[in-house]
Image (tube, rainbow, N blue to C red):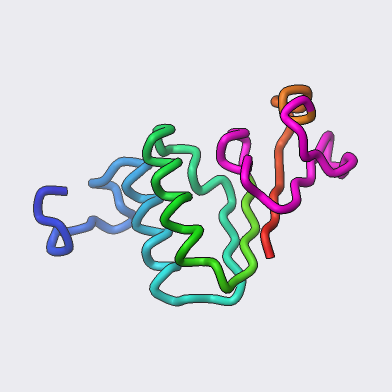
């Protein structure tokens, strides 16, 4: 966005990309500084480099809060304290190893950090 903070945003964010809409939504949430952050597939429209950079920055900004991340990309939840794998709407045993992540790539993943 060439105009930075002065860039106009259309109703519903129709003049920005999906990744830009996600970053704007995350920025709005960070300003509010809630006790609980819920990221529901918030990183899916981001490329891997932006995803990693954003998660690194968020770790500092959300250090004193509970963070729940719903993700399908393994790299997004790799550093979570707890990972719950959902398979056909049921919780499987908590996964924590790379082998577990690989075996469950097609299922939705919910990670929590408190």
Is residue 59 magenta-colored?
A: no
Residue 42, placed above or below residue 64: above
| Residue 82 screen position, x and y as percent | 75, 51
Please give the count of numbered marks on the rendered protein: 0
Q: At x 84% / y 44%, what residue is drawn?
A: 94
Image position of 11 (left or right of 113): left
Q: At x 32% / y 47%, what residue is drawn?
A: 20
Residue 6 picture quarter: bottom left
Image position of 38 (left or right of 91): left
Residue 65 picture quarter: bottom right
Q: At x 10% / y 49%, what residue is drawn?
A: 2
Farthest residue toward the left?
3
| Residue 61 screen position, x and y as percent | 45, 66
Q: At x 17% / y 63%, what residue is drawn?
A: 5
Bounds of the magenta span?
A: 71-99
Residue 77, placed above or below residue 88: below
| Residue 44 screen position, x and y as percent | 49, 38
Residue 49, placed above or below residue 40: above
- Position of the C terminus, as image quadrant, is bottom right
Image position of 13 (left or right of 82): left
């Amino acid at each position: 966005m060439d105009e930075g903070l002065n860039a106009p945003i259309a109703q519903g964010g129709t003049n920005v990309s999906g990744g830009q809409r996600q970053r704007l939504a995350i920025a709005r949430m960070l300003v509010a500084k809630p006790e609980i952050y819920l990221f529901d597939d918030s990183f899916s429209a981001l490329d891997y480099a932006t995803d990693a950079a954003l998660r690194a920055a968020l770790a500092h900004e959300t250090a004193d809060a509970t963070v729940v991340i719903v993700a399908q990309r393994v790299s997004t939840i790799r550093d979570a304290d707890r990972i719950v794998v959902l398979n056909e709407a049921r919780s499987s045993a908590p996964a924590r190893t790379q082998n577990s992540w690989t075996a469950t790539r097609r299922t939705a993943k919910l990670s929590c950090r408190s």
